Image (cartoon, rainbow, N blue to C red):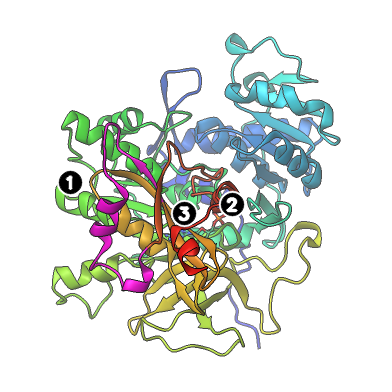
Amino acid sequence: MHGLMQDWPLLTHRIIDHAASFHGTREIVSRSVEGPIVRHTYSELNAGARKMASALSGLGIKKGDIIGTMAWNGYRHMELWYGAMGLGAVVHTLNPRLFPEQLVYIINHAEDGYFFLDLTFVPILEGIQDRLKTVKGFIIMTDEAHMPDTSLRNAQCYETLKAGGDDGFQWPEFDEKTAAGMCYTSGTTGNPKGVLYSHKSNVLHALSSSSADALALSSVETILPVVPMFHANSWALVFAGPMTGASLVMPGAAMDGPSIYELLDTEKVTLTAAVPTVWQMLLMHLEETGKTLPHLKRVVIGGAACPPSMMDIFEDKYDVEVIHAWGMTEMSPLGSLCTRKGGLEDMPDKAWRAIQRKQGRPPFSIEMKIVDDAGEELPWDGKSFGHLLVRGPCVSSAYFKGEGGDILDKDGWFDTGDVSTIDEHGYMEITDRSKDVIKSGGEWISSIELENLAVGHRDVIEAAVIGVAHPKWDERPLLIIVRKEGSKVSREDLLEFLDGQIAKWWMPDDVVFVDEIPHTATGKIQKTALREQFADYRLPSADAAE
Ligand code: ADP
């Protein structure tokens, strides 16, 4: 027997309908690419998205078509995003930090029809347009006054296109399983692969991410998503913001410390989210200027491990609560968040801080387990580590066009490629990516843990650890350091700093100093590039062992 409740498909445009009805005056404040700060309300977003949907239909874009976007977090990107999804089209966001060859591959593979871009990216698209097989035209996301002189084919002005649309456009009804958004994973091995979100997965993910034990979002918050919309839906915030009536502050192209600080301060932001490298820039700015964060209550840090030293500075010096989060593009992307749960209220703060450093626990809709190499489930004791598997309605079931084949096991579990522990309270901690863990004499050393400790040294800006070949132990850790300007901190100083904080056999065999550590397009340390760079590196201990 079926229940007798209404069939109300979970469609993303319902989010902005709700926002316009009940939070119509709440704002989206954007640092525009043209320069000034611009302000819009959720009512305006709803009308603008309808107008855009109608204009897109006029271009011939229909349900199932894929449009490409290369744009910063800003009002126009949101309007286009909701308008296109509401039409049943798929918004494929591209990361401008990818190499041109990767962009060409991804746009051709996705078969993007029309392509929407911010002014910033005109040169990138001009450089690759001849190799883009499916793109019929480019829409530049600006007004007539700022239209550039461009060689892009069929270039059109966004505002002019929108002006021809109808803000009374009626959203069509369709199945909630319809594709809504697409994002390619950076593909550290092989070609990038397309993750295809549905309306239902986006709505469910926003609901579960905004719940009280996760991001605890509500209409009293002002949220600054520094994490870009092209980095896995800005971690749900562009959906969860309007869903809960929170105001949004969109940073546009400026993600440096002073620019982010300015928005946090003038807009009285209460919650913000980004990868650790962004926070490192902000903290340096605060240190240099002596400024503080009087309005900010919570900062979400994820995408890469949050170093404990960073957490301590936010919490103890600036009185900002850190929510460490973990996830991946294939998970929409949030998989776990570290917030204190019922039953741990009386735990002393120091003991809680030790747990807070972990990547956290999943909100409802995500199942999680750890298994050994044979697929046997491991205990939740905080010590046993194994492959982290996940399952749920916001987790990929396959990649676009079946790339990579079958990605689920027979029971529907997806292997995240991460190795982790889970403790008795259900808090998960990432040990490493399985590709990055250092295998020394049959035992595993966590590169993340060594990096986290090394950046705790006051002269270190960034640290990376990779495994280097060793005749006796297979692999041993090499610590790669970017020193603060003018610092003379030495190999011996750093090894001494680590001494006593780690098991003897975890001690890096050598330390090298570099000017810069390479990063991926999403701001993570690019271990593959470091492994190539140090492929011929001979550890002093390797010479001694032979
Ligand atoms: P990309 O490589 O394209 O940036 P994702 O953003 O999907 O891909 O990256 C997901 C991976 O990032 C995770 O599988 C995990 O290895 C790493 N990661 C994300 N958040 C954290 C975190 N808080 N701590 C440690 N690793 C993290």
Q: In the figure, is residue 332 to the left or right of 406?
A: left
Q: Which mark is residue 536?
A: 2
Residue drawn at point x = 25 percent, y = 51 percent: 493
Mark 1 — residue?
318
Name the amino acid type tagged 2.
Asp
Residue kind at label 3, given as amino acid type: Gly
Q: Position of residue 50 (x, y in %)?
A: 62, 37
The one nearer the camera, 239 or 446, is: 446
State the residue in front, 526 or 369: 526
Q: Which mark is residue 80?
A: none
Residue at mark 2 to residue at mark 1: CA–CA distance: 44 Å
Mark 3 residue element: loop
Cβ–Cβ below 8 Å for labels 2 and 1? no
Q: Amino acid at mark 1?
A: Tyr
Q: In front of the other: label 2 or label 1?
A: 2
| Magenta residues, start to end | 480-507
Q: What element does badge 1 sit on? A: loop
Whole-percent x and y of residue 208?
Answer: 46, 65
Q: Vertically, is 455 above or below 436?
A: above
Which tag, 2 or 3, sits closer to the chain's start?
Answer: 3
Which residue carries the number 3 mark? 303
Residue 207 visible in the displayed image = no
